[in-house]
Image (cartoon, grey):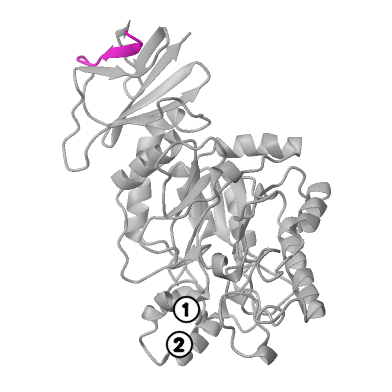
Amino acid sequence: MSEKNTKNIVENGVHNYSAPADYIEPKNQLVKENLKKFMGKKLGFMMHWSPGSQLGSYESWPLSDGDAQWSQKDLTWADKETCKQQYWQANKTFNPIKFDPESWAKLAKECGFQYLLFTTKHHDGFCMYDTKTTDYKITAEDCPFHTNPNADIVGALYREFKKQGLAISTYFSKPDWHSEFYWCDKFGTAPTRNVNYDVKKYPELWESYVQYVHSQIRELASNYGKIDVLWLDGGWVRPDNMGQDIRLGQIVDELRSTTQPGLIVCNRCCGEHEDFITPEQTIPETAIGVPWETCITIGDNFSFHYNDNYKTGYQITHMLLDVVSKGGNLALNIPAQPDGTLPAPAVVSIREMGAWLKIFGEGIYDTTLCEPFFDDKLYYTRKGNDIYCFYSYNEDELPKLPKKLTLDIDKKVVRARCIRTGDILHARNESGKVTLDLSQIPMGGAFFAEGFCITVE
């Protein structure tokens, strides 16, 4: 891919995704088995968090002058260069004393999340874990938080989320703008998000970067027990773009043969190590027949902004229905505040979604695609011989079911029931469809969508 084309990988900070037609199925049998299990989890608790959250700005992007001017609109309190220096030095004032990993994990479990996707390191290069590769990290002495018992934030989160039975997806940025091996000072200001020197002319410098990246990934895979997914951001770091080959296959093979057998890898650029594809801030219009996960923010931004607009419980629940009916997972990003707490409006929304999932989760988790997938107010999923159908309500109207509901199911019905009430429903097969009698279903409790389970032969 040429430099010109790589600019389309990320547009205004939003990462584009590979075409499903280009998907390459993993060859490793254990990876395939783990991937199937992971795609049944459906809902991930994603989080962008770093010292830069104190500034209420975009994560990392304001540091890149050449192709991220859109993100620098937040740099308003001083001149741009001063703002950038304050971003780089935000670690020296970062002290999230209200950080409570146990409460985060319990909240995630209570609200129906099945895995954690946390930014161990974003493009700015700050490590939210204890590493031997750099002092630009949460446990360094120049970070006030380093004396806290939970100073190794990644370690604390992984410990508590695992206690709650949640899986771990490890976010890691392939580009590292703080590294002297990537944005090298002797070559001047970096013109774009890419490496700021000619890799072919300086192979030793690039090799130092490759070893740096491998060491950090190796730490994450060795120091915190089992991880389920290695989620690699920064799709522009790839061999066919300016020779930015980090020899991903080498480190992946090493991990799968040592500390992390069956490790799922998400490389976010089409190829052998993109075990699932990753739409961002969007949901595909149609069902996708390959593994995929979309990452979408509960507010307008991935990072914490002091004035953000948070989606309602209704909106995120319907988003989840849309994603699951098309065969995907939803990684819902909830940004932490600088003090270590979660935004109150976001917590209200996920609790509302969680209350709905407590009733209807059987039709969400471990389900697969079911034609016709979705239709008007209906969303379909499947688990064995059970077909689930969700009838969605409008957000601004009181819930009201029709007396009869006709579903596009061309199979003989063995039994039909209302998930919420447990009532057995009269079902009639006719002309390749199934009609349910809902006239006796009491209203109440299904404030976002009603769910039905139709067992077929």
Give the residues drawn in magenta, as a range. 431-440
In the displayed structure, 320 sits above or below 186; it is: above
Q: Judge from the rendering whether residue 369 lies leftward or rightward of residue 180; answer left or right.
A: left
Residue visible at 42% across and 10% down?
A: 411
| Secondary structure beneath label 2 | helix
Neighbourhood count class around disc 2 (C-alpha, 10 Å): few under 14, some 14–19, many 20 upward: some
Neighbourhood count class around disc 1 (C-alpha, 10 Å): few under 14, some 14–19, many 20 upward: many
**Could you say which quadrant of the image residue 402 lies in?**
top left
In the displayed structure, 199 sits above or below 314; it is: below
Q: Which residue is mark 2?
A: 83
In the displayed structure, 184 sits above or below 366; it is: below
**Labelled pair 2, 1 in contact (Cβ < 8 Å):** yes
Label placed on residue 62: 1
Give the quarter of the figure containing the N terminus. bottom right
Which of 161 and 207 lies nearest the eye of the viewer? 207
Amino acid type at mark 2 = Cys
In the displayed structure, 97 sits above or below 275; it is: below
Question: Where does the image place residue 133, in percent across and percent down from the top left?
Answer: 74, 74
Amino acid type at mark 1 = Pro
Question: Where does the image place residue 143, in percent across and percent down from the top left?
Answer: 59, 80
Residue visible at 37% across and 79% down?
A: 73
| Separation (CA) of disc 2 from disc 1 | 9 Å
| Secondary structure beneath label 1 | helix
Which of 204 and 87 lies nearest the eye of the viewer? 204
